[in-house]
Image (cartoon, grey):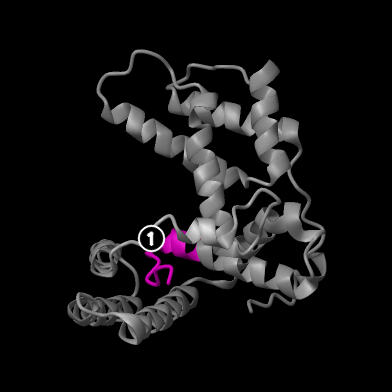
Amino acid sequence: MIHDPVNDDARDSAAPIDPADYCREIESYLCRRNEGHLIRIVGPVFEQVSGWAAQGVPLAVALRGIDRYCERYYAKGPRRRPVRVEFCEADVLELFDDWRRAVGVSRIDDPPDGARASAGRDSLPAHIDRAIARLTAVRASGRSDTFDRHVDEAVRELDRARATAKHARGDARSQVIERLSALDRELLAAADAEIDGARRAALLADARREIAPFAARMAPDARDRAIDAAFARLLREAFGLPVLSPEP
C-alpha cells in the first residue's frame, strides 16, 4: 500500500466534485477541443452530464472519453460541426467501466461475472506485441538511465515471453500471465522511484479524489486497496506504461 504520513488523516476529506462545477469543467474543456466554439451544457444535457458525476465518473476519465471521441471525429476529415458532449457519452462510460475494474469499485448495474467473461479474450501474443510497442515509445521519453534499464529488461523479457505465449495453454498460459503481472509491478515500482515526494503526494491526492464518490460505502481495507490501485493507474498514465498483465 502507498502510505502518506502527511495526508493519511485527510483521506476522508476529499469530497466528490459539485455537479455544476463538474459540468462547467467539461463545458470549458469541450470548448477548447472545439477551438473556442462554446456549446452550453444546459437542460437535458446538463442532466446527462451531471449524471456522470452522480455515478462517480472521475473528471479526468470523462475528459479522456471526450478526447477519444474527438480523435475519431477528427480522423474522418475536415470538421463540419463542433462536437457535442452528448455524443461522447459512450466513450466516457466505457472508460469509466475500465477505470472501475482497474481500481476495484463497483456499481449496482454491473453485469454478472459470467456475462463479462463471455465477452471474449484477447490474444496473448497480440497483447504482448502491443506492450512491447508501448514500452519502446516509453524508452525514448528521456527518463533516467536506471529507469531506461528497467524498460529495456522488460522489453527483452516480453520478447522471450511472446514466443512461449503463442502455444501456451492451461497452466503454461497462467504461468506466463503470472510473470507478466510480476513484471508489471516491477515497472510500476521503477516509475514510483522516479518521482519526487511532491509529485507522489499530488498523484495520491488525485487518487483519493477519484475514489471519494465510492468511499462511504467501502470497508476501510477495500477503500485503501482502491486508492492504491487508482494511484498505480495514475502513475502508469503519467509514464505511458502499458498494462502488462491481461485479464486471465
Kindly indicate the quadrant of the structure image that contains residue 169: bottom left
Residue 102 location in percent, x, y? 54, 62
> Furthest residue to the left?
163
Q: On the rendered image, what quadrant is the C terminus found in?
A: bottom left
State the predominant SS element of the stretch in magenta: loop
Label 1 neighbour load within 10 Å: few <14, some 14-19, many 20+: some
Residue 26 location in percent, x, y? 59, 32
Kindly indicate the quadrant of the structure image that contains residue 239: bottom left
Q: Residue at x 70, y 32 (%)?
A: 50
Residue 140 location in percent, x, y? 25, 64
Above or below, 34 relative to 206: above
- Residue carrying label 1: 240
Q: Residue at x 66, y 48 (%)?
A: 109
- Mark 1 belongs to which amino acid? Gly
Kindly indicate the quadrant of the structure image that contains residue 199: bottom right
Looking at the rendered structure, the secondary structure element under dot 1 is: loop
Write the start and end of the magenta stretch as one range. Answer: 234-248
Q: Residue at x 35, y 28 (%)?
A: 73
Above or below, 53 relative to 183: above
Q: Residue at x 42, y 22 (%)?
A: 35
